[in-house]
Image: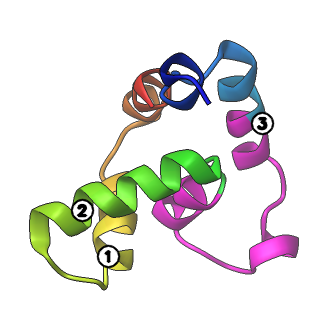
Amino acid sequence: MTYQKKYRKMTTATITKTINKLNSNLEAEIGKASLGFKRFFVLPTRVRRALDLAIYLETKDLNTHQKKVDFFEAMSEQEYINYLKLA
């Protein structure tokens, strides 16, 4: 796997797919959940793993779930879209 392929940013199509999945009815799949958890849940695996690693390296704590949910909960819709563009 080349460096370009492994560390690429999300494409516009992937961002659209992620937003559409977030706006779909997720309750059937994951039950009642906060917006922060839903935003985290719909992220591609590569992005979730990178976020886990970043939070772990910052805090040295293996339990990163609440920090991830709080991170996405505090974002506005536009901030979330900008985050996806950089992810």
How far, Cα to Cα, is label 3 from label 2?
A: 26 Å
Q: Is residue 72 above or below residue 59?
A: above
| Left or right, 73 with reference to 7 | left
Q: Marks 3 and 1: CB-CB under 8 Å?
A: no
Image point (68%, 35%), residue name: 19
Q: Assess disc 2: are there few (<14), some (14-19) or many (≥20) residues with their C-alpha within 10 Å of its C-alpha.
A: some
Tell me residue 61's x, y (percent). Answer: 19, 81
Tell me residue 26's x, y (percent). Answer: 79, 63
Q: Marks 1 and 2: CB-CB under 8 Å?
A: yes
| Left or right, 51 with reference to 17 | left
Which residue is situated farthest in the left direction here? Answer: 59
Q: Amino acid at mark 1?
A: Thr
Q: Amino acid at mark 2?
A: Ile
Q: Which residue is mark 2?
A: 55
Q: Quadrant of the N terminus?
A: top right
Q: Quadrant of the C terminus?
A: top left
Q: Earlier in the sequence, mark 3 or mark 2?
A: 3
Residue 36 colored in magenta in the image: yes
Which residues are the magenta region? 18-41
Q: Which residue is mark 3?
A: 20
| Left or right, 14 with reference to 83 | right
- Numbered mark located on residue 64 in the image: 1
